[in-house]
Amino acid sequence: MESSSRVFRFSAKRLQRIRNRVREISFFDAREGWQKSPVSPMEIAKLFKRIRVKDGFELIAYVFRSGAGGNGVVWAVPEGCFPDVSDCERLDDLMRTPKPRCAVSPHYVVEVGGSPESYIQKSIFIREIEEFGAFWHGLSWSLHEIIDSKPEGFRWYEDVEDLNPKVVMGERVTVEFFTLSEFIGEAVYRHEDVYKGEMLESSRRVIASGGAGYIL
């Protein structure tokens, strides 16, 4: 750690409460196929008080349903630009994801306020909107719980004592937090985001494992 760095710790329970509110807002019915989302991801952004969407832009979403699963995609667009699915370009992926011609990644327009809390909020927010509209078999990040203590009965691959969510402020800004997922198999994950200006580089790895989990 850089000698001039300062470490700021945050409450895992408080971050989880925000995520619970996200779940309440983003749970909605949708028909089969791609469609405009009936809920705006801007409502999710309002829950994260320390970040903001750049002036002149808004976040929009399209959602997809197929049987017991679903996915979604969030784009940043100039305010007022929300074309129908039929008027969008399509990405060259398996789902033929719609993308308005005026759209860019939300990463470019979600701004931090410069405080340590704004950085950890952006890290959580980006993960939330990357899974916005996902349903059942489309879930991944939503199956994780942010934790601050070691669950019992796990085998640890790294020597970690402090599991509190934290932000290290120095020449660069680093966000670190830990999650527990019981999907397929119980595991603890370390998440690390390194910010360079507004942009970030993310990594995730398993640092402990437990028993058998569940499947959807």
Image (cartoon, grey):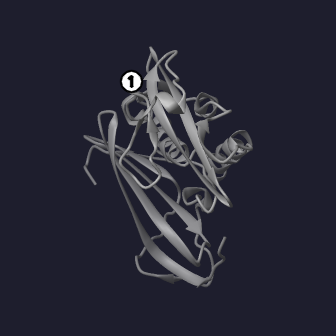
Q: Position of residue 61 (x, y in %)?
A: 55, 35
Q: Position of residue 135 (x, y in %)?
A: 65, 54
Q: Nearer the viewer, residue 216 or 169?
A: 216
Residue 26 vs 114, above or below: the answer is: below
Residue 194 vs 100, above or below: the answer is: below
Q: Considering the image in quadrants, where does the N terminus appear? A: bottom left
Residue 192, quarter of picture = bottom left
Q: Dot 1: what SS?
A: loop
Q: How many labels sit on residues?
A: 1
Residue at the image position 68 percent from the left and 42 percent from the top: 26
Which residue position holds label 1? Answer: 102
Q: Position of residue 36 (x, y in %)?
A: 60, 33
For the view shown, which residue lies furthest in the front direction? Answer: 86
Residue at the image position 52 percent from the left and 23 percent from the top: 82
Judged left or right of residue 181, residue 108 is left
Q: Position of residue 197 (x, y in %)?
A: 29, 33
Residue 200, quarter of picture = top left
Judged left or right of residue 28, residue 200 is left
Q: Are there few (<14), some (14-19), or many (20+) residues within 10 Å of tag 1?
A: few
Residue 191, quarter of picture = bottom left
Q: Nearer the viewer, residue 180 or 28?
A: 28
Q: Mark 1 is on which residue type?
A: Cys
Residue 89 vs 186, above or below: the answer is: above
Residue at the image position 35 percent from the left and 48 percent from the top: 92
Q: Considering the image in quadrants, where does the C terminus appear? A: bottom right
Q: Nearer the viewer, residue 92 or 16?
A: 92
